Structure formats: structure tokens, C-alpha cells
Image (cartoon, grey):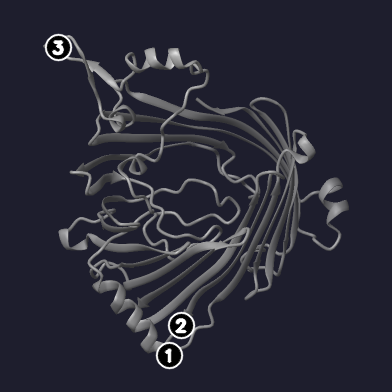
Amino acid sequence: MKRAAAALILLILVLPICAQEGSDNFDDLFEGEILEEEGEPAAEESQEEDLFESDLFEESAETGQAQEIAPEEAFLVSEQLEWGGSFDLSLTAQVASNDYITPWEKAFWDPDISSLTSEVSGDLFFDARPDRDFRVFGKIKAAYRYPADPLLPAPPPGEWEVEIFELFSDFQIKDLLFFRAGKQTVQWGVGYFFSPADVLNLVSIDPEDPGAEREGPIALKAHFPFAAHNAYLYLVANDVDKPFEIAVAPKVELLLGSYELGIGGFYQFDLTPNKPMGMLTLTGPLRDLDLFAEAMIRDYEDILLFSGTTGFSYINSDWNLSLFAQYFLRDQGCTAPITPGRHYLAASVGWSDLLDSDFGLSLLYLANFSDGSGLITPTVTWDPIDHVRLSTGLRISYGTIGDEYAPAGGSLVYTFSVSLGAGRF
């Protein structure tokens, strides 16, 4: 195992190529934010006239005649600054009991804790594309939550949190080499609930909210697509004050039939006890399932530690049904002294627009097999009108005091929340 782990790290670190999410054209760097408008003319005559009024042609100042513009210009260039965002106001009531043996009676009629939390949140972004080879994107997030932690005996007061979530520019060299410079989110791993291979983002995945955006680092990304494959290189300069502290993270993504193999590495000189890290990812289909797997090896104070995960997802758009399941082994020692690691399982099922109604059901299960703790959260949602959602559910934790998913012992929390005015603009 020691030789295999060392060989993997050596293989990864000598690769002269690069890192980040798979995309093979310049517009993918723009995150695909190309909007289609409804209500376009259907008749051939109207379409013929509109061709000469669209951005595919522009009038020459010298000749006064229409000149054709390359089709990609119309999509990658915008004379106006695009902007938008989101807004949400939510109110959440909770009653909680730490007596999980008789939780129903105690939680509802004699709760240990009851609370009401209000939260207002939103984000605002801009997208500027002055020419096909240059783009600037930025996003600001703001949130206010009161109280900050309602389940504490003396919850602290709320406060505004405002942050620049993303701010970067995209540029390129002759449609061959693409760059992104600035504060950016990174799609480094492939896991849904857990991602041991993602060593670049500043925030780990929250298994209770795996779809949430995560803050990324200040970095320069170089992307070189070749054939059906991609090579990346990240230079990460987050929280460093010396040139030699800049981290280097290469990655290559290889398309092998219907599967994609990712091989990458991470190294930051003498800044943390983690020396080199190596990672592998694999994604691909198996009938109606989408499979994914990750492996990561890191050198921690001359001890090789291994983390790995595997899982699958199933999406049925006809039934509005989604299913995710994932196993995670965290930090198992590969050399003496042996460390046992921790074993996790996460699974969720969601069924929206239940029987063509405005109701939805979801169930989340998280388990730490190493300490015997776990979490079960069934939830029912109802969207009575646009921009209003009601949800109610339970948060059932089991285990003993000090366990990961039951720090205060087994407990039951009943939650009712309403989201008002939520939407994107």
C-alpha cells in the first residue's frame, strides 16, 4: 500500500498539466450564461428580416453596408452590462428535545428549546463581456440571521454578513489557452455529499446542503483543451504573503469511452503539515445510474493518509425523482502508525411536484459508522403560490454525547419554515 500510494503521488506530481472543472470551449469558462428569449418569430420571412437586424451583422462606418460577424461573437460579446441576483426572506420555528427515548410527547408539549429564527439573504452579480476574448464577472452575497444560533441556551445576536463571493476575469490566447484570474469557485472533485479530492475550495461540502455554493480561492487558472480531453493548472495565492508560498495544483481530465478520469495534485511549500497531495476522480454511467468516485492521498508529517469515496445518482425527470447515495472513508493511515479512519454513509431521495401537485417530499440520511451516530431529516414542502414556500420536517439525531451527529446526545427537532418573496431576477 505504501509503494502504491507513493507511486500515485509521484505520477501526479510529475504531470506538467493542469486543474479544474471540465470544459472544452471558451464559453464554458463563462459558465454557460447564455439566455434564450421566448416569443421569437416563427415565420421564415420574419427570421430572414431579423438576421439583418441582429448582432450577427453590423454596419460598416465607411461603406454603410452590413458586414457579417462570426456567430460566436453574438454570444460572447455584449454591449450592455448584464446583472441579476436573488432574494429570500425566511422565518423558521423550531422546538427541540434532547430526550430521544420519548421524543414526540416531550418535543411538542415540553420542549427543551423553542425558537424563531428570521433570515434575509440575497446576492447580486454582474457580467461584462466587452469583446469575445475578455470577460469580467463578480458576485456579492449578503445575509442577516437572527439569532445566529437559535439552539444555544444563550444564542448570540445576529449580524450582517457581506462578502465578495466571486470576482474574476476570463481571457484567452488564440482560442488555444484559456485563463481565469481572480477569486473563483472551483469544481475540483466529483462527490455529492463528500469530496476528499477537493483541496482548493475554502469551504467543504455541507452534507445537509450539498447543492449550496462554496467559496473558492484567489487563483489563476490555465485551461488547455486537447482533443476530447482537458488540462488545467491552478496557481493559488489565497492568504499567502511570500511568492514561494503560492500553491500549485495541476490536473488532467481524460475521456475514456463514456467515462472521465481525472488525475491531479496539490503542493504548497512549507506552509502546512500537508506536503504533496494526489487525487484521482472517475465519473461515468451505468445504465440509468451516474457513478462517481474519488481517491486522495496526502503526506501528513511523513505519514501517508488515504481518503476515498464512491457513490451514484439517479435522476428521473418524468417522475421528478432524484436519488443520491455515497460512501466515504476519511483519512485512513497507509503507513505506521496505522490510523483507523472514519466511515460515513449519506443518502437522499427527493420527489418534487408530487403527483402533479405543489407538494414535495425529501429524506436525508447521514451516518458515521465509526462513532455510531447518525441524522435523519424527512421534509415536506408546499408551494401554494409563486415565490412562497412552506416546509415542515423533523431532524432526528441518534448517538451518545460527543458523537459527531449527536454532540448533545440523541435529540428530536421539529421545524416549520416559510420562505417569502424568494426568486431570481
- Residue shown at 45%/49% (left/top)? 214
Q: Amino acid at mark 2?
A: Gly
Residue at mark 3: 61
Q: Mark 3 near mark 2, Cβ–Cβ under 8 Å?
A: no
Give the mark toward the camera: 3 or 1. 3
Q: Mark 2 near mark 1, Cβ–Cβ under 8 Å?
A: yes
Q: Is residue 301 visible?
A: no
Q: Secondary structure at mark 2?
A: strand
Residue at mark 1: 336
Q: Secondary structure at mark 1?
A: loop
Crowding near the residue tagged with mark 1, few <14, some 14–19, many ≥20 C-alpha atoms within 10 Å: few
Q: Quadrant of residue 25?
A: top left
Residue at mark 2: 333
Q: Residue at the right extreme?
A: 105
Q: Is residue 157 left or right of residue 257?
A: right
x and y percentages locating residue 32 in the rendered image: 41, 38
- Residue shown at 53%/69% (left/top)? 309
Q: Amino acid at mark 3?
A: Ala
Q: Quadrant of residue 203?
A: bottom left
Q: Secondary structure at mark 3?
A: loop
Q: Nearer the viewer, residue 215 or 79?
A: 79
Q: Nearer the viewer, residue 282 or 88?
A: 282
Vertical order, 351 against 396 (above or below): above
